[in-house]
């Protein structure tokens, strides 16, 4: 048993001051004001001393960290997962960028193989395949040699049960709508991205079942007031959850505030899109088959073109994304939290067990200081990180 006392609990839609939480194994069993949650004898007690307790963060787009790249080396997924609680992350989708299909399937097997012995960390909930069905005109940092047209034969083994949770693809490609319909029926969330789709082509993709947009404004045409394209369609369509990198580099800071006001906490989903350089010194790092030059704030493809041309992932920390959203928009903490807890959980169909601090939910929680820095992270009921 784990017992947290004296915390200001922020779970989306609810704040409890001087609250307590009890977890038994990997699940939360009781939440309430001090005195309403009896402490079991023998429980490990954490005195939060007034710190803020929030649900663990869910990152739907993470390419790697700590020097490891999931696309190049899918076997590193569980090792990286052990380090992610330092950013408050308790669940994530390891993201495999455009590569041979065997590489995507290798990652699915690594995740589906389950947690290694004595594992303590953020749980990979399945794979996010970013590609290979992308528009070559918006390839970003993906290797065009591996881009393909959507084909049922290529996705025959892909389902949520097999470990494919999210697929980013360009809905305007020939054959895309059939693949969307098939994968959605198998429980895969389909995202539109790395795309030249017009407004109409994007909506056709949504009608076929796509429900997400990958890193809004990046790797898609600009939003025009008469020619809205994919970004306009994603913003305008209430069915869509929209992934967004709030690092002030992938978009102007003012856009963070604009999309917040347009989408709100139920449709805006903050992701990091972080790559191998996350948690590492600046320098040269790997993304798929390419080298990426990383400075203090950004990651750019070393493709022989002048440095600064193509962004290649980020080094954004999830807790920094939370601080950025609160600082730039001035929104309440509880609403900012939704964008990385309940909103991604709902997209994945896991909102009955993840994203909240409530009885029956997975005991994924983060203790934050008043300035929203991670102090302690509890993943699946175990203390997975403590700040020194
Ligand atoms: Zn991308």
Image (cartoon, grey):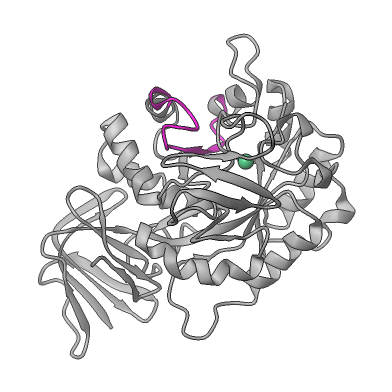
Residue 379 placement, left or right of 313: left
Identified at 32% across, 50% down, the residue is 12
x then y, percent, for residue 322? 34, 44
x then y, percent, for residue 321? 38, 43
Residue 355 visible in the shown view: yes
x then y, percent, for residue 259? 44, 27
Quadrant in which ligand 1 is drawn: top right
x then y, percent, for residue 106? 73, 67
State the extent of the magenta-drawn residues as a range: 236-255
Q: In terms of image quadrants, where is residue 377? A: bottom left
83 relative to 187, above or below = below
283 relative to 187, above or below = above
Front position in the image: 112 or 26: 112
Front position in the image: 353 or 117: 117
Say whether residue 8 is magenta: no
Identified at 16% across, 79% down, the residue is 38
User: Residue lying farthest right?
Assistant: 153
Identified at 39% across, 39% down, the residue is 265
Quarter of the image with the N terminus is bottom left
Say whether residue 238 is magenta: yes
């Amino acid at each position: 048993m784990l017992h947290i006392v004296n915390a200001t609990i922020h779970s989306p839609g609810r704040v409890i001051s001087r609250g307590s939480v009890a977890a038994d194994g990997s699940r939360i069993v009781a939440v309430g004001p001090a005195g309403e949650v009896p402490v079991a004898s023998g429980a490990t007690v954490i005195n939060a001393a007034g710190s803020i307790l929030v649900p663990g963060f869910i990152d739907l787009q993470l390419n790697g960290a700590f020097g490891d790249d999931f696309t190049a080396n899918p076997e590193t997924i569980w090792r990286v997962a052990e380090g992610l609680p330092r950013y408050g992350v308790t669940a994530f989708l390891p993201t495999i960028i455009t590569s041979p299909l065997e590489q995507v399937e290798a990652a699915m097997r690594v995740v589906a193989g389950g947690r290694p012995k004595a594992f303590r960390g953020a749980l990979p909930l399945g794979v996010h395949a970013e590609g290979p069905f992308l528009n070559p005109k918006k390839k970003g940092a993906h290797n065009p040699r591996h881009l393909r047209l959507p084909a049922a034969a290529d996705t025959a083994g892909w389902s949520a049960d097999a470990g494919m949770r999210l697929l980013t693809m360009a809905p305007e490609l020939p054959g895309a709508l059939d693949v969307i319909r098939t994968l959605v029926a198998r429980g895969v969330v389909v995202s539109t991205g790395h795309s030249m789709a017009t407004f109409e082509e994007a909506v056709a993709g949504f009608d076929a079942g796509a429900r997400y947009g990958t890193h809004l404004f990046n790797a898609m045409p600009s939003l025009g007031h008469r020619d809205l394209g994919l970004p306009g369609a994603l913003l305008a369509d209430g069915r869509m959850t929209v992934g967004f990198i709030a690092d002030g580099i992938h978009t102007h800071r003012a856009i963070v505030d604009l999309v917040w006001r347009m989408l709100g906490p139920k449709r805006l989903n903050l992701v990091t899109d972080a790559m191998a350089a996350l948690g590492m010194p600046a320098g040269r790092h790997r993304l798929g088959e390419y080298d990426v030059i990383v400075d203090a704030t950004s990651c750019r493809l070393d493709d022989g073109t002048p440095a600064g041309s193509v962004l290649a992932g980020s080094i954004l920390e999830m807790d920094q994304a939370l601080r950025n959203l609160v600082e730039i928009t001035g929104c309440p903490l509880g609403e900012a939290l939704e964008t990385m807890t309940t909103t991604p959980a709902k997209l994945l169909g896991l909102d009955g067990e993840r994203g909240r601090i409530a009885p029956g939910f997975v005991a994924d929680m983060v203790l934050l200081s008043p300035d929203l820095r991670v102090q302690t992270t509890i993943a699946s009921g175990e203390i997975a990180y403590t700040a020194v």
